[in-house]
């Protein structure tokens, strides 16, 4: 089976780890390709930072700091302290020394002419990941946040990282903008992975700034839906709350309720020009299944909490089983 996952962020990384575990345990011979959000990427202190890709890289390689949920295990932060002292990096964004090694390598390769896809391949050569990671696009399309409530018609805009990390999404957002998105195309690895794939899974990542940014790449939705492979999504909302992070603030900005069924409707039904064939909600949202089924979604209520490797693999199995049931 050829499996493609669209993902971003820490929750996406944990889901992909569960998919890998399920494949290794019960679906030998299967391959897993991951389309990773690049909208959170940015330049800092002359270095190209790719938070979602690196979360995937560290989680799948066993290098992730599980207690903090991000960064490398056993980190020190001496270099970041020096960058703060020199005023070339903000104090609200700290990079670990081991993590900086990744950013320096990435930036050196890109300045030498490598594309983000080239860099992704080189970074993955260091550790056996069991999956293949692909940046959604090789173009720079960093996400910015336009804030609500500015006076005198002025629009205040922040890079997503400042809004998310410094302000913890507390500043009301009016809209999210990916500068340069109009010139972006899916990366070559994305298109190759989708060719003749058997199943496409939408991870329980932020629907707006992670999955939404991937889907905003021109040609991406068409590439995802061009194949006969069923597309099954996993809700990032359980019982009216986001599983991780501050997705509520993002959903509110685009007028979508923080609700599992509302997110499915936001993605849309594939047969009606949207994205999804199937949708998994949590047991806490089981009452939404009948309504979603009546609208044409193949919906199931299953345990969504990824508490450990076993529960993550079980969730992946539910998503894959639903996709297999939907195959023509």
Image (cartoon, rainbow, N blue to C red):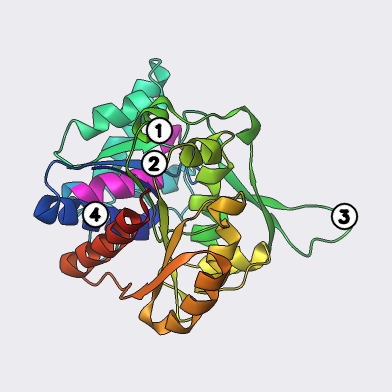
| Residue named by callout 2 | 35
Q: Are marks 2 and 3 in contact (CB under 8 Å)?
A: no
> In the image, is residue 241 part of the stretch drawn in magenta?
no
Instruction: Kindly tell me whether residue 96 is visible in this rendering.
Output: no
Q: Are marks 3 and 4 in contact (CB under 8 Å)?
A: no
Is 120 drawn above or below residue 172 in the view shown? above
Cα separation, mark 4 vs mark 2, equals 14 Å
Mark nearer the N terminus (4 vs 1): 4
Name the residue furthest front.
Answer: 328
- Whole-percent x, y for residue 120 in the image: 32, 31
Cα separation, mark 2 vs mark 1, equals 6 Å
**Magenta residues (range):** 44-60
Count of marks overlaid on the render: 4
Determine which quarter of the picture holds residue 11: bottom left
Is 258 drawn above or below residue 38 in the view shown? below
Cα separation, mark 4 vs mark 1, equals 18 Å
| Residue named by callout 3 | 153
């Amino acid at each position: 089976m050829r499996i493609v996952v669209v993902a971003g962020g820490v929750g996406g990384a944990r889901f992909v780890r569960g998919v890998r575990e399920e494949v290794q345990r019960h679906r030998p011979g299967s391959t897993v390709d991951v389309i990773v959000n690049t909208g959170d990427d940015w330049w800092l202190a002359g270095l190209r930072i790719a938070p979602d890709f690196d979360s995937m890289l560290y989680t799948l390689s066993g290098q992730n700091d599980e207690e903090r949920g991000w960064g490398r295990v056993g980190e020190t932060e001496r270099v970041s302290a020096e960058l703060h002292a020199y005023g070339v990096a903000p104090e609200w964004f700290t990079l670990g020394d081991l993590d900086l090694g990744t950013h320096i390598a990435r930036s050196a390769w890109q300045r030498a002419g490598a594309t983000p896809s080239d860099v992704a391949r080189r970074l993955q050569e260091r550790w056996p990941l069991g999956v293949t990671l692909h940046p959604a696009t090789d173009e720079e399309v960093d996400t910015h946040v336009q804030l609500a409530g500015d006076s005198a018609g002025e629009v205040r805009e922040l890079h997503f990282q400042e809004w998310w990390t410094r302000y913890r999404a507390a500043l009301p957002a009016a809209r999210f903008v990916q500068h340069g998105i109009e010139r972006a195309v899916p990366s070559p690895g994305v298109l190759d992975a989708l060719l003749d794939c058997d199943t496409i899974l939408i991870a329980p990542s932020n629907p707006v700034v992670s999955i939404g940014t991937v889907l905003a790449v021109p040609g991406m939705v068409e590439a995802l839906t061009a194949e006969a492979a069923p597309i099954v999504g996993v809700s990032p909302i359980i019982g009216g709350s986001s599983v991780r992070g501050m997705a509520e603030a993002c959903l509110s900005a685009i007028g979508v309720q923080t609700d599992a069924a509302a997110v499915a409707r936001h993605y849309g039904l594939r047969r009606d020009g949207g994205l999804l064939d199937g949708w998994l909600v949590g047991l806490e949202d089981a009452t939404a299944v009948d309504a979603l089924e009546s609208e044409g979604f193949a919906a199931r209520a299953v345990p969504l909490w990824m508490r450990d490797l076993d529960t993550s693999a079980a969730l992946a199995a539910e998503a894959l089983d639903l996709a297999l049931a939907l195959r023509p």
